């Protein structure tokens, strides 16, 4: 359930990046989750639970969020030679961190969650804690996806060449 809202951000990005395939936009908004899954498979980070909270500093801390965003943006600049595309992808990667700061600590999902780590010190966290409340958390997750989907569909409609009326 958590981390769905990011998909909505990727979908909505179609509005500012109509030429980029939506799959890439969603991948960028979930890039930090992909990093997390790789690190989890390697045994470096752990799945968040009620008892542990969501402490995954290599993928999800603020400092590493900046790092992954710059890395992804730099890579895209290198292959696409487009500053605009690089900024959009880098920005989408950072939107994951930004959204998690607004949501964390996600107590509605993980009872012991303490918030987004700034870096590797578990005691130093940030977060507005909007996902402290279950209702807000669910409305937030589904709301973002729905809103993103509506924006995406609207953009697709605009992109389609208009069919001449016979
Ligand atoms: Zn995440």
Image (cartoon, rainbow, N blue to C red):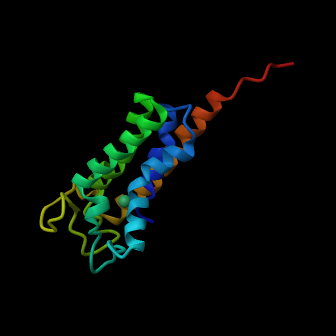
Residue 130: quadrant of the picture: bottom left
| Left or right side of 68 for 7 | right
Measured as percent of width and height from the top left, residue 105 is found at 25, 63
Q: Residue furthest right?
A: 166
Q: Quadrant of the C terminus?
A: top right
Residue at point 64%, 32% (across, down): 157
Residue nearest the observer in this picture, 139 or 149: 149
How far from the left and from the top, in percent, is residue 132? 27, 64
Tell which residue pokes out farthest to the bottom in this image. 51
Q: Work out whether residue 30 or residue 74 is closer to the camera in this orientation and state it.
A: 74
Whole-percent x, y for residue 120 in the image = 18, 64
Task: Tell me which corner region of the image, top left, top right, bottom left or bottom right, holds residue 81.
Answer: top left
**Residue 114 at x, y = what percent?**
20, 68
For ligand 1, which image quadrant applies?
A: bottom left
- At horizontal 50% and vertical 48% (from top left) the residue drawn is 26
Quadrant into which the N terminus falls: bottom left
Farthest residue toward the front? 78
Which residue is found at the position 36% from the left and 40% from the top? 74
Side of 40 where 25 appears, left or right: right
The vertical placement of 3 against 163, above or below, is below
Is 147 on the left-hand or right-hand side of 32? Answer: right
How many numbered marks, from 0 up?
A: 0
């Amino acid at each position: 359930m958590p981390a769905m809202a990011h998909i909505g951000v990727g979908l909505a990005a179609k509005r500012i990046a109509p030429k980029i395939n939506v799959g890439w936009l969603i991948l960028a908004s979930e890039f930090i989750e992909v990093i997390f899954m790789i690190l989890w498979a390697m045994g470096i980070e752990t799945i968040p639970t009620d008892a542990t909270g969501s402490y995954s500093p290599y993928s999800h801390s603020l400092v590493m969020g900046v790092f992954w965003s710059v890395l992804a943006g730099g890579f895209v600049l290198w292959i696409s030679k487009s500053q605009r595309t690089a900024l959009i992808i880098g920005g989408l990667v950072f939107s994951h961190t930004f959204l998690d700061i607004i949501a964390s600590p996600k107590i509605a999902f993980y009872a012991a969650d303490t918030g987004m780590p700034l870096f590797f010190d578990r005691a130093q966290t940030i977060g507005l804690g909007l996902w402290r409340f279950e209702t807000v958390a669910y409305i937030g997750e589904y709301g973002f996806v729905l809103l993103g989907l509506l924006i995406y569909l609207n953009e697709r409609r605009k992109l389609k060449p208009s069919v001449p009326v016979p």
